[in-house]
Amino acid sequence: MRPYPSRGPSHSSFSFGPGPLSPAIKALIVVNVAVFLLMWFMPTGLKNAVQQFLGLLPVSIFQDFRLWQPVTYMFLHDTTAIGHILFNMLALWMFGTELERMWGTNAFLRYYFATGIAAAVTTILISLAPFPSTARMFDTVTIGASGAIYGLLLAYGLTFPNRPIYIYFIFAIPAKYFVMIMGAIALLSSMGGGGSGIAHITHLGGLVAGYVMLRGRQLSPANEVRYRYLRWKMDRARKKFGVYSGGKKDWDKHIH
């Protein structure tokens, strides 16, 4: 995380975080925390049943057609580890607020859910691979907003590549390198053994989906046509209003 500079009329200071909650960020945090608290007070049996029903469970999607799970799993968090939801909601606020202000609420929500769903699809596809290390993913529940959060992290790194991010509030590194480190950790962890591989596959899916969405938008034919059209309009405006670059040969021309 990093402190944000805050400049007043007569002095400079630093404030923690990107400022007040934007509309989508506020709604997402409220829903996630409300679901977390509700499940916190549930009996263990009911809590497990809810996770099986709303969490991401590939076997249930194929056998019971629970097609809502790639969306609903993002709103469930581990109630035995408060750090799970704490980190996700803090990262959502820190990295998502500026993106929502830049993109607008609707575009931000589309990106958030698209990367979260893509992370779920990645987990489902990997669970179908014919390897012992991935077979257990088919009947294991995955919960949490981390896939979408990693998508936001990727977007933040591409949008503000040189912004410093403070690790443990001490070591500052540019956002682009922070994203690379987090992606490498997710990749290496997903390739290793142990019980955490499922979550890291989901993280990696969110990162890859975010990259494809953002780069694809930049390279799409529609954007190229739009760019050419805007360039054409600007060139026409320059000619219409007689805008010149300057120089001795232009001294006798009327400049607007």
Image (cartoon, helix red, strand yellow):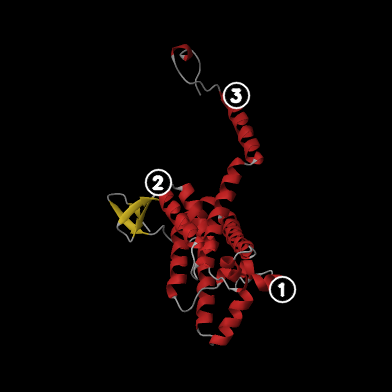
Amino acid carrying label 1: it is Gln
The residue singled out by tag 1 in the image is: 63
Amino acid on which the number 2 mark rests in the picture: Asn
The x, y position of residue 102, in whole percent, is: 51, 50
- The answer for how far apart the CA atoms under marks 3 and 2 are is 39 Å
User: Which residue carries the number 2 mark?
Assistant: 162
- Residue 174 is situated, as x and y percent measured from the top left of the image, at 38, 49
> What residue sits right under mark 3 in the picture?
240
Q: Quadrant of residue 68?
A: bottom right
Q: How far is mark 1 from mark 3, CA to CA?
A: 65 Å
Q: How many residues crowd mark 3 within 10 Å: few (<14), some (14–19), many (20+)?
A: few
Q: Secondary structure at mark 2?
A: loop
Looking at the image, which residue is at 51% across and 62% down? 190
The type of residue carrying mark 3 is Lys
- Expressed as whole percent of the image width and height from the top left, the position of residue 178 reads 41, 53
Compared to residue 98, the image places residue 199 above or below, namely: below
Judge from the rendering whether residue 93 lies leftward or rightward of residue 58; answer left or right.
left
